[in-house]
Structure formats: C-alpha cells, structure tokens
Image (cartoon, rainbow, N blue to C red):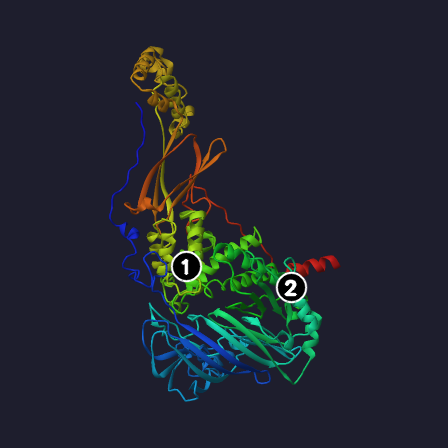
Amino acid sequence: MTVIASCAFAQSNTNQSKFKQLGTELPTPNVYRTASGAPGPDYWQQQADYDMKIRLDDANQRIYGEETVTYTNNSPNTLRYLWMQLDQNVRAKDSDSYKIRQSAMEDRMSFDQVLDMEPWFDGGFKIDHVKDASGNDLPHVINNTMMRIDLPRELKPGQQFKFDVKWWYNVNDRMKIGGRSGYEYFEDDDNYLYTIAQFYPRMVVYSDNMGWQNKQFLGRGEFTLNFGDYRVALTVPSDHVVASTGVLQNERDVLTSEQRKRLAKARDTYDEPVIVITEEEAIENEKSREKGMKTWIFEAENVRDFGWASSRKFIWDAMAVDVNGKKPLAMSYYPKEGNPLWEQYSTKAVAQTLETYSKYTIDYPYPVAISVHAKWIGMEYPMICFNGGRPEPDGTYTDRTKYGMISVIIHEVGHNFFPMIVNSDERQWTWMDEGLNTFCQYLTEKEWDRNYPTRRGPARNIAEYMGGDDSKISPIMTNSESIWQFGSNAYGKPATALNILRETVMGRELFDYAFKEYARRWAFKHPTPADLFRTMEDASAVDLDWFWRGWFYTNDHVDMSLKDVKWYQIDTGDPEIEKPLARQARESEPEDIALIRDEKFIPKTRIEQDTSLHDFYTTVSEFEVLRVDREEYEAYRGELSEEEIELLESSKQFYEITVENQGGLVMPLIFKFEYIDGTEEVRRIPAEIWKMSEPTVTKVFITEKEAVRITLDPYLETADTDLSDNSWPPRPKPTRFELFKQGQRSGAGENPMQRYRRSEQE
C-alpha cells in the first residue's frame, strides 16, 4: 500500500573520461617539481642582476642606456651561450609582429588605415655594443626580439658571468601607436609624461622545465623573467619628478627639504595620503624649462623587472600601509588632469589592494607600491604600475570612469603578487597571472564596496561568453598568442573558475588555505600550471582533476536542464485520509468540454428521470469509507514496526528530479526548494554524481514540506548559460522594451555629475 519512489541511474561509460585523472596531461614529477605541487629538493632558478645608467632625452623622446649584467648559473647544466630579450624590437620596422598582422582593402579608407598597413615608427633597440667585463667585444646574434650572446668560455654550474650592453631607442607615442609603455604629450602645456618599461635588454629565463624560454615576443604574450637585484641611475631633466621600482637612494639630491619632510610624514601616516608634491607645485613645474639634468638613483632587491615614470606634471602623494607589522608605502603620481579622481581614490586603492592580497596570498614584501596615471593604459611592473581613468576637463566623471579607474589600479597593483612575486611564465600562460590576479581583484573589489560593479569573477558574468560560438572559444590551456577572445579567456574564465572552486566546489575554508599555500610555496619562484593544480588538491584533499579538465582543457560550457520533476507522496493506507484525497484529486481534474456543453443540450439524462435504474454503483460513492476499509487498515498497521509507522504517518514529500547536461561541462548540482509555507531550503550535490551517468542523472529528494517551486543553480554560481529550463514549474521571464520618439532629449551626452550641476544651477 505504501509507494515510495527510488533513485535510478543510467549506467554509461561515456562520461567517465570527464573524471579521468590528469596523469598524462601533467608533466612527470621529479626532484625539481614534486607530485604535491611544491618545489622539489633540487629546485633551482637562475639570477640576473643589473647595474644600469639610463638617460632620458626629453627633446627627442629617446632613451639611452648602459648596463652591466651579472648572470649566475644556478642550474646543474653547463651553458655555452646566453639569451637576452629585446622586447622593444616588437616595434622595429622589420618586426614579425607587423608581418603576421592581417590586413584587407576597403572601397573607402582613412589615411590612418592605409598608413597603419606598414610600420612608420622607427622603433626597436639600437645595440651599440656587447662587451665582457674586460671590454672585449662579445659575439652576438639578434633574432627578432631575442639576442644570443656567445660566451668566451663555458659557464659551469655555480659560476657567474658579467657583461656590458650599450643601446638606445626611440620612445613610442602611446596615444598614436599604443604600447605597454611610452609617452603621452600634453599640448596645452607642451609637456610629456613618460611611462617607461621594457627599456633594457633583459635576460631570458632558463628553467628546469623549459630550458631557454625561446618564444619570440609578438606583442600579446607578456614576459618571462628572472629575479635579481637592480641599481638604476635615471638621468632626466632637472625639473622632472621620477617614480620607479625600488627605493630612492639619493633623496637629498633630487627632493627639496620640504618634500623630504612630507615624505617622512607619509611613512607614519595610515589614514589619509600625505601630499608630497601638491597640484599647485606641479603646475609650476609644468611651466619650468630648466636646461640641466638630474640623476635619480633607485635600488631594488629580488625583483623580476624594473619600470619607471618621469614628468614635470606629477602630483605625488603617499601613505603607509599596515601589513602585519610591515609598513610599505602606497604612493600615487598623477598629472592635474587626473584630479579630482586620483587624489581622492588612487593611493587608498593601492593600500586596499596590498591589504586584501596579503590576506589571501602572502604578506606584501616590497617597501613601496606605486600607481602612476597615464591615459588609456593599464600595465604592471614590480612596485610600480601605470593606470588609466581620467575625468572630464571640468572635473566630472561617470561612475564607469571612477570604478574603471579603481579596478585598473587594484588589478595592476595586484600584479605585484601575480606574476611579480609568484613568477609564472606569461609568455606561455597568460591565465596564470591575469586569471589569478583577476580573481584576487574580485575579492578586493568586494572589500572596497559591497555593491561594487565587478566585471569579472561572478559566475553569471561569464555565462554569455561560454555559451557562444565554440569555434571562437579557446581552452584556458592555450598559449597566449593563440587565444580567441583574449579578455574573457585569459582573465574572466580562469577568475570565474577559481571563484566557483571557492564558493561552490571546495568551500571558502579549504580553498583559501590551499590558494594561500600555492602563493607561499611559489613566492619568488617559477610555477607552472601543474604546480597550481597539484597544490590546490594537495592542500585541500579535494580531487579536482575533473574540474581542471573541464574548465581548463576544454571549451565545454555549463548548461544544466531540469529535464523532469516527478512528485510523489506516501500512500498512508488510512481510508479516512486517502479517500478524501482521491475525491479531491478527481474533482480537481479538468472538466470534459462535452460534459460542459451537455448541461445545456441534455436537460436530463435517463438515469436522472428514472430512479429505478440506480444500483450499488450509482448510489454508493467510491470515496465512501467502509467499515471493512477501517478493519483492513488496522490489521495492516498491526504488522508494522514503530519506525515504519512513523514513516507512514509522516508528511514527507518525494521529488524525483532528472537533470540533463546539455553543455558538456560537469558541475555540482544546487537546488533551491521553495515550500508552501514560504520557507526555503538549498540542497547541494557534488559534481561526482555525474561519474557514471551521461547525459542525465536522476535523484530523489525527500522533504518535510510540499514544494511550490524548485530551482536549479538558484544563485547563478555555476555559469549556466541557459536559465530558461532551470525552474519547476517553468517560470518565463519578461523582457522590457523601450519606447522612444525621433530625436534626442535635452542633456544627451552629459554624465550624471554634469546633469546634477546643471540642475542645481537652474
């Protein structure tokens, strides 16, 4: 008499590959990199130290440089030659980056379109000499953005080699030809703002897993670099202010006594930035045209790169940040064109970034973190980054401009952790720095403002991309130069994957511990994707191979559908309960249209006219409770145990739910049950439910109350690309449309701040 539905699973082997371990895809563990994801007992990495003298020619927008490189061979291998990166050569007229760029003719073309078909800017390094420490010329060969230096003798393990390089190059106008660094010209006051990077020949990484990293720089895949110590003397016009990687060594030579006092005050000020150079002072500097030069000397220890900025236009502010007892300085340099936004937000955004990233990774180890304002840019280097976000000339701005500026500052300052400290190979794997950094950016934005308009991180924000044309979507594990939809693939999708791991798959406690352990293990080292994958599993005891395989090695997407929901209730066997319910069910059935119409066309049936036609079946209702019904029920109960009687008398509801995987990417199943009394309950099922079933799984959920609605992925945490089939009963969602008249309304084109000002004036 009791009917209880049971679980049923379709057995299939077609889905087992989704849960296959990542054995063959990952490199074999060894003494350098262990199966746990940690550096091995014999892990090693090379070191490259630089002593540089750089001169900025402001009249001709040119950089002249000399460097002494000390290269230490920490590898177990003997080296016969060294490789250097010549990244500025990406802008040389014969660069492959121009040759591989596709182009096409149109019937109507602008001058700029035609001019851009061939390189016109004379970019690239001009190498004057490469010499050993004794001044002897070293044989060298330039291959596009790489230079091989042939050693006079073999460099054995543990040995060092010193050599000198002298060069110059023309600085690019970022506003015309783009670039990660370059200059911006301000016509109103005839000044330049230089944001300078990739300005020196740099050592290529030689590693245990790659040998020499020999992939050319084509513009997209960024940089693979060694750690080392830097001493850089920057000679610039004497009325310029310089921001740089490292710590200024000669404050007395380049700053006034008042500026030094302000800077000293900033080192012990934690609440508000201290203005080191005011806007009024910067405006005076803009007017200056001193003919002399001044040298700023900076030193940086254990960094993988070096960047700097120089201009007459800089306002400068700074404040200290408390990072577990350390006191790094958060600083900003910006022209007056950046105010009021930059004075109000930049340095505080730098401070927030150091605090939040330190909480989730490692304590920020460097003495400074600098944000430099330049239009239309976002780029990172150790301790310094260049960021966009400029208000209108009247000082107003949109919320998009404000939040865009704060986001780019958080993102670029955050790059100090990935990849400046956790030093992944950007030339090969953009996602290892951009994706991890974007994830931490998301955490930082939430700590800045609970309602922050975050672009990347929440699962719902990646769904449209993942549900798009498969032919234009690359697996995350794709080399940087070969990625379709670069931003979504290298930034958004890996950041979302980590967020889903944290919120849905692993939980915050397990994820945060494992992610922090990855940062701790690989700080100031060179991790690979396998090191991340293995560490996250090793430190959490969660098997994530299915997740890495689906999210990182395929372009499958999430599309789960509530294919079927069946609702069962226990038949109690009690006639006093079941027969009224049966009557109610019968009466609730839709009426037959013929019977409705017969009310009019058949005034009386034969049986209604002639009572002699009645018998047992027309006079005794099938829903009437008979004495024999009660007796049989009592006999049935007498045979049941207490537990069986308790179950029989319970009001449990049974929902048999079948979910279909239409997108191919397996994920945990999250159901929200909304009950008839207004309460709610969420049930979470691990992704392993898909191990033996494809493309559907069926599971029974037992509830204490009747559900009026069941929703799959109710909080949009799995990046499901189609939500129209995620509810039972189905729930259509309206789309609003806008009516308009021809023509524009008054005030179109104004930002909200400008509209408010106009309203106040009127």
Quick one: 482 or 246, which is closer to the camera? 246
587 up-or-down from 301: above or below: above
The residue singled out by tag 1 in the image is 521
* Residue 164 in the image, given as x and y percentages of width and height: 45, 83
Q: What amino acid is labelled 2 in the image?
A: Ala
Quick one: 444 or 206, which is closer to the camera? 206
Say which residue appears at 54% left-offset and 68% top-offset. Answer: 385
Say which residue appears at 33% left-offset and 52% top-offset. Answer: 546
Q: Picture quarter containing residue 390?
A: bottom right
The residue singled out by tag 2 in the image is 266
Q: Picture quarter containing residue 47?
A: bottom left
The answer to whether residue 448 is left or right of residue 285 is left
The answer to whether any part of residue 248 appears in the image is yes
Q: Residues within 10 Å of mark 2 (few under 14, many from 20)?
A: many
744 up-or-down from 648: above or below: below
Quick one: quadrant of the C terminus? bottom right
Mark 2 or mark 1: which comes first in sequence? 2
